[in-house]
Amino acid sequence: MARQYITVARAQQNKYLANVSTSILETRIKAASELVYRYCDNDFTVNTYTDVLDGNGLDWIQLRQVHITSLTSCSIVSGNTTDTIDTSDLSYDAGTGRVGFAEGNSASTNIFYKGFQNITIVYGAGEDPIPEDVQEATVQIVYALSENNDSEQSPAITEEQMGEYKWKRGGTGQSTAIPQTAQDLLFGHVRFEV
């Protein structure tokens, strides 16, 4: 899935990107959005996600995405039995990505049985609009990746590698794809394991 956390018009609000061609910006925006996704370990686009998870034996489970907007389905496999859990028997914390059994539920089980990839949950998640600090960080990364960058502090790209999205700048040997200011903007959105 190609992520795109900003539009070309949003990128062009940066005076250094205002005259960069649309096709170059579109490519850089996708690369920058992927970098933001990997850095934060969280996707901000509103979408439907299917997580296949290892059961933990608890009454709650952590989903891959945060900012949950809805639950569509849940199934739990234990041995040769598959329990389909009605989503009304579940509750979720939209900010943390946790799903648990609701108080007074009528489900056939109240735990996510331990197992290897035995839990399947389909859900909606994402943010609309994408937070402004995430958008601004994406713009800064697009700028850092831009070949038309005239700044002495961020010279034009001299090397590019698509696998793992690493770029090198003028002979320093350091990857500066995510400038420190963008990292600072994204810090509150980085997902830490719980």
Image: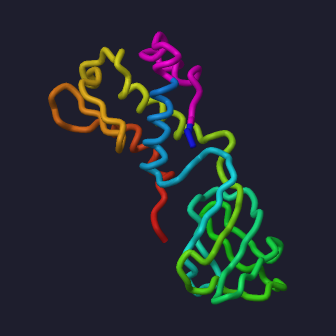
Q: Quadrant of residue 49?
A: bottom right
Tell me if residue 41 comes above or below residue 34 in the rendering. Answer: below
Q: Quadrant of residue 67?
A: bottom right
Magenta-drawn segment:
4-25
Q: Residue at x 29, y 18 (%)?
A: 151
Q: Position of residue 102 (x, y in %)?
A: 77, 79
Foreground of the two, 82 or 45: 82
Q: Position of residue 87 (x, y in %)?
A: 80, 71
Q: How many numbered marks are there?
A: 0
Q: Residue at x 68, y 48 (%)?
A: 47
Q: Is residue 7 magenta?
A: yes
Tell me if residue 158 comes above or below residue 176 in the rendering. Answer: above
- Residue 129 relative to residue 143: left or right: right
Q: Position of residue 115 (x, y in %)?
A: 55, 83
Q: Is residue 107 magenta?
A: no
- Residue 12 relative to residue 45: left or right: left
Q: Quadrant of the N terminus?
A: top right
Foreground of the two, 78 or 174: 78
